[in-house]
Amino acid sequence: MKCTNRRIKRSICLCMAVFTFFLTGCGGTKYSFAYDPEYGVSSFGLFSPENARTAEPFAAELCVVPGNVNLTDGTEIPDLGAALLCDVNDAEVLYAQGVHERLHPASLTKVMTALVAIKYGSMNQVLTASENVVIKESGAQLCGLKPGDTMTLAQALHVLLIYSANDAAVLIAEGVSGDGETFVNLMNEEAIKLGATNTHFTNPHGLTAEDHYTTAYDLYLIFNEAIKYEAFREIIHMDSYDTVYYDKSGNEKNLSVNTTNLFLRGNYSAPENVTIVGGKTGTTNAARSCLILLSRDISGDPYISVILKSETRDLLYAQMRDLLSQIGN
């Protein structure tokens, strides 16, 4: 609803008259009215288009998702836990399904791990592996770090995001913050700052834990912040990585890894009008198959897409292709 200045002034005058009446009552005692349209902090000053001082809303440049948004043909994507597709520049939601449901994120957790590390660490700092890099959980993705091994934060971030190594996540957390618990606390603090209020992390890698959860929407918020950093964008775009790090005796150790993102490896193809920049995969028994991506349309405009809890890997990539097909429609 739009109001003119004249209407606002009339309303204020009426309110002043009524207020004065109640103050004076029948006794004739008059009270001065402390505010007028010219007073700097009056209601008129706050709401007048001419005098208003406004703060930038928190979500001014973010997608806001109050409920589900179906595909352009009116349908949903079946057999998944949650999905979201957002136009980054226009802050427009192109698809949303179950985006506020708390789910296991698996290795999509590592987006926040990388964001905190890039923000608070130094790319050249040397990290030393503790006994905690020895993860014995069945099926855990590892790059083979041993206690005493050293590599820079830049190297560890490449291994973390490209290969999704859980031991690299422990190395980063302890190296940046001194211990894993402090780093995880920082992850949760950063999540709250970003508005990811349905998120709680208990570890830096995403292996299943009871109190470790997030939502598709919160992951969008976290990923949207991470892609503001050039280092993050560069790493998630790489399909492989070769490096040399050192053991506790100073001997060289060679490491060569390929991306877990099967779009970048060419196993699956995106729609013709879409270019996939990169992203992060995640898979555990509890989380099923998960994927978050940064993509661009034919004009170079960015989009963020995320799918959680797809039943199988093949289905995940088919669903993501369906999701990305909404770009440009």
Image (tube, rainbow, N blue to C red):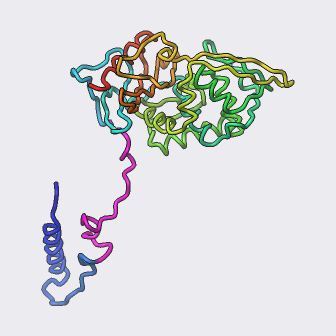
66 in the magenta segment: no
Where is residue 67 shown, x and y percent of the image? Answer: 29, 33
Q: Residue furthest front?
A: 299
Left or right of 254? Residue 285 is: left
Determine whether 207 is above or below 268 in the image: below
Where is residue 249 shown, x and y percent of the image? Answer: 87, 24
Q: Quadrant of the N terminus?
A: bottom left
Left or right of 35? Residue 255 is: right
Residue 23 lies in quadrant:
bottom left
In the image, what residue occupies the spot 17% across and 78% down? Answer: 22
Determine whether 77 is above or below 34 in the image: above
Q: Quadrant of the C terminus?
A: top left
Where is residue 282 shown, x and y percent of the image? Answer: 51, 20
In the image, what residue occupies the spot 37% across and 58% down? Answer: 55
Secondary structure that dominates the magenta span = loop
Determine whether 292 is above or below 312 in the image: below
Q: How many marks?
A: 0
In the image, what residue occupies the spot 38% across and 24% down? Answer: 82
55 in the magenta segment: yes
Question: Is 124 in front, or is 102?
Answer: 124
Left or right of 27? Residue 231 is: right
Magenta segment, which residues? Answer: 39-65
